[in-house]
Image (cartoon, helix red, strand yellow):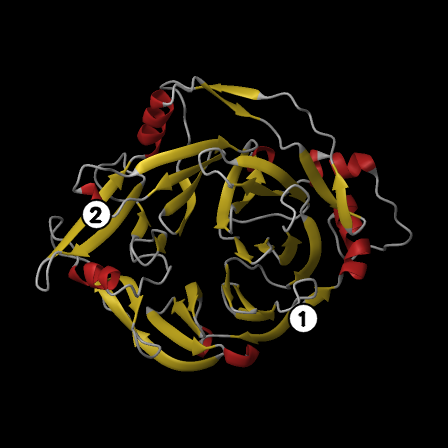
Amino acid sequence: MKKVFAPSIFALLSVACLVCVNFGCSVGEVKPDPEIVTSTKSQESIFTVIEMEDVEYPTVEASIYLPFRVRPNNTVVISGKHAYVTTERHLHVIDVSSLQRPSYLASIEFTDEIGKAVISGNQLVVASPQEFHLVDISQPSHPVLQSTMYLPQRNAIKDFDVRGLHLYVMGANESLYIFSVALGQARLVKVVEMSPRWWLFSPKEVGPGVKQVLLTTSDDTFPGGLSEGILSRRGFLQLRSSLHEKVRASSDFVVQESLRSTPTTCDLLIYDAYRISDIRVSTGVYYYDLGRECLEHLSATEQKALARSKPMVAYAVGAGKMQQIDQDQRCEIIDVDDRLRMGPVTDFQISGDLLYVTNAKGFFSIIRLVKLEVIRKGDRINFVSIVPLQVCRPMSVAVGERYACVLATPEDSQR
């Protein structure tokens, strides 16, 4: 049975979680203990807000230290001025209307582990390996679990995405299930058998169907279905590819995590296409080495060092509200030289012509994507900025209007 905690109930339970990480323990008149609130032992995960009014100079504004464990498939997503964060068994709502002072609003606990979340209007879809849940977020301070659904024959869920009022769920049986999610209920409308050579999915212009982009049989051949999906501006479902790589897409670009590509130093593959004439199409892929591009950017801007420091304001959850944490303002100075290690890419998102990337060593970068027809005139993809986060491993990044949110696990919890 799922448990929904209003802020008044969470006021007691959050303290209990900070003290004993056990929602079943007895809670009386419990007062927050400052030593517990500031203890790193209670900091299972970190929610960070980054201001991006000027994308060349992003600033870490605030962090919330949460006493909830995160898994690699947990995510943060944004709707308006609210961020929705999944941890191991919880969905959390955080008001980020004030970037310097984010406010923790509410939480829902699930009996099973949950992972990814996506937004569809006033609904949030949250999935576990065996089921998915529809949550009403029309009142962000009071999220309501509307329904829970399974795939036919209880097939396991590998990944899912939402477009409009259609939910696309990839089953472990190599079928793609398409649901209508209107009115808080999921109704199965179509099942698509995935081709043995499937790679990506592009939604059809009319109806709930998809077009499958197939893997090519030659490394030198650009997948034809990929350029069609880009030029039609239908975009692509953000489902992991058949090569298990993360995929992010806008109306102009497709960006894919590079796990098996050549050259091996490539972090991301950036695909683009444009129409030269009615019968001629130009397509291209850019092999993006994030570490190399970052070092070249820092060299060109004559930056000799990066300062990694905690944000000026940080909080922990206690007594149903944000408790400010005393911050050690000493900075860790990171020399900019060939020894700078960003670690592998952990997540990335596209908004407009900007690509936002997090790396395993606690870095957040912004890259400007240039359309293929402009690159042909001599321009290139531009590395815009980099900012170190706390010492952490980012799991998920979400992008809002002039700000970004990052969900991470502290370095200590990785040991």
Instruction: Give the Cα distance between marks 2 and 1.
Output: 51 Å
Above or below for 383 versus 103: above
User: Which of pointers 2 and 1 lies earlier in the amino acid sequence?
Assistant: 1
Q: Quadrant of residue 380?
A: top left
Numbered mark located on residue 83 in the image: none
Q: Horizontally, is 154 left or right of 290 in the view? A: right
Numbered mark located on residue 1 in the image: 1
Q: Where's the C terminus, which quadrant? A: top right
Q: Amino acid at mark 1?
A: Met
Q: How many marks?
A: 2
Q: Horizontally, is 252 left or right of 145 in the view? A: left
Q: Amino acid at mark 2?
A: Leu
- In the image shown, does 75 or 206 lie closer to the viewer? 206
Q: Badge 2, how many Cα within 10 Å: few under 14, some, many 20+?
A: many
Q: Position of residue 63 (x, y in %)?
A: 63, 40
Above or below for 205 versus 231: below
Secondary structure beneath dot 1 equals loop
At 76% across and 39% down in the image, what residue appears?
37
Residues under numbered marks 2 and 1 in contact, where contact means CB atoms less than 8 Å apart:
no
Numbered mark located on residue 372 in the image: 2
At 53% across and 55% down in the image, what residue appears?
77
Secondary structure beneath dot 2 equals helix
At 28% across and 63% down in the image, what residue appears?
233
Q: Where's the N terminus, which quadrant? A: bottom right
Q: Nearer the viewer, mark 2 or mark 1?
A: 2
